[in-house]
Amino acid sequence: MKQNMRIALGQMQELTPETMTFAKQLGVTSMQLNTPNLPGESCWAYEDLYALKKTCEDNGLFLESIENVPIRFYDKIMLGLPGRDEQIENYCTIIRHMGKVGIPILGHHFMPNFVWRTSSEPGRGGALCTAFDLAVAANGINQVKYAANREVRIPDEAVMWDHYEYFLKAVIPVAEQAGVRLALHPDDPPVAMLDGTARIFYKVENFKKAEALANSDAWGLNLCLGCCSEMVYGAANVMEMIQHFGPSNKICYVHFRDVQGTMPKFQECFLGEGNYHPAEVLRELKRSGFTGFLMDDHVPNVINDSAWGHRARAHAVGYMQGLLNALELLE
């Protein structure tokens, strides 16, 4: 396993020849898939996960992580509905398959109603950037077209904590045995309540609580810098998360993005024009002992770009590569 900070290309659902060629042209050999398009209504088969890993290897690439299973695979887990034990067993099966295949990280979140944005706003040079305004979201408006469960609402944060603890107690021993790390993504947006359902991963101290509940090296963070920057206090959250979780090797990998503004209102932006200083953050990651991968995440919609965002992602990858090269020279 590689032991230096590196760049991965991700947030795709398929490994196409074009995407893999694009990664190699950018000088990237690590890949991540988010909710991959695989057969199965409730679980993923070993053979399909093996095929993903082999496709990467056959093209000189390494599949670092899978981030998220479909909402339909574990909405009952998050909401505590009848059938959650069956969903947990299927989730454990996926963990075992990933361990057997050799995919080391499975990312997860705990947002039944998933990611919310309320508008797209012009950013630098007119590039469109997603934005969130809690005052608008109070009307139930969500412009992100992802599958989510909005039929059941749980306003009590303590109940959501009970559901997460129930989930951890079932999956952590399986992950430990399989050699797979479970990487938790922060809530996006980081708000205590959204659309009638409580959220639990919207402030720094709650991640520390989850760390204690898991009490295992198999639990860690998919540290989304953008989500941490969105929280009240902005860049200070980013530094606190790195300083607390980095030295104990609890940061599995990093979503390198940023926003302008903090809750209750923020807008995404290009790297280098948000709340935190990217070079300072990367230096802090290095000092904390982080040796995982950094990756592109949400990117602005630039002129003549593809739906996936090839141009904007190339800019983000190049920006991170430059920072890494400079850091290596300085140190």
Image (tube, rainbow, N blue to C red):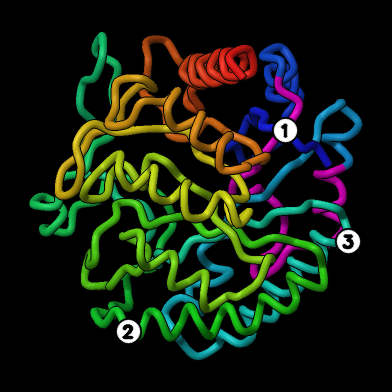
Q: Is residue 266 left or right of residue 80?
A: left
Residue 117 placement (x, y as % from top left): 27, 45
Residue 197 placement (x, y as % from top left): 27, 72
- For residue 248, above or below residue 308: below
Cα separation between marks 2 and 1: 39 Å
Instruction: Give me the residue at 55% from left, 60% from top.
Output: 108
Q: Is residue 148 left or right of residue 121?
A: right
- For residue 5, above or below residue 83: above
Asked if marks 2 and 1 touch (Cβ < 8 Å), the reply is no
Residue 129 appears in view: yes
Residue 110 placement (x, y as % from top left): 45, 66
- Which badge, 2 or 3, is on the more N-terminal residue? 3
- For residue 153, above or below residue 183: below
Q: Nearer the viewer, residue 275 or 56?
A: 275
Q: Secondary structure at mark 2?
A: helix
Q: Secondary structure at mark 3?
A: helix
Look at the image and say whether residue 43 sits in the magenta stretch: yes
- Which badge, 3 or 1, is on the more N-terminal residue? 1
Residue position for label 2: 158
Amino acid type of the residue tagged 3 in the rendering: Lys
The span picked out in magenta is: 28-53
- Which badge, 2 or 1, is on the more N-terminal residue? 1
Residue position for label 3: 100
Amino acid type of the residue tagged 2 in the rendering: Ala
Instruction: Give me the residue at 66% from left, 32% from top.
Output: 5
- For residue 245, above or below residue 15: below
Residue position for label 1: 4
What crowding class fits label 1: few (fewer than 14 Cα within 10 Å), some (14-19), or many (20 or more)? few
Instruction: Give me the residue at 34% from left, 52% from top.
Output: 188
What crowding class fits label 2: few (fewer than 14 Cα within 10 Å), some (14-19), or many (20 or more)? few
What crowding class fits label 3: few (fewer than 14 Cα within 10 Å), some (14-19), or many (20 or more)? some
Residue extending farthest bottom: 82
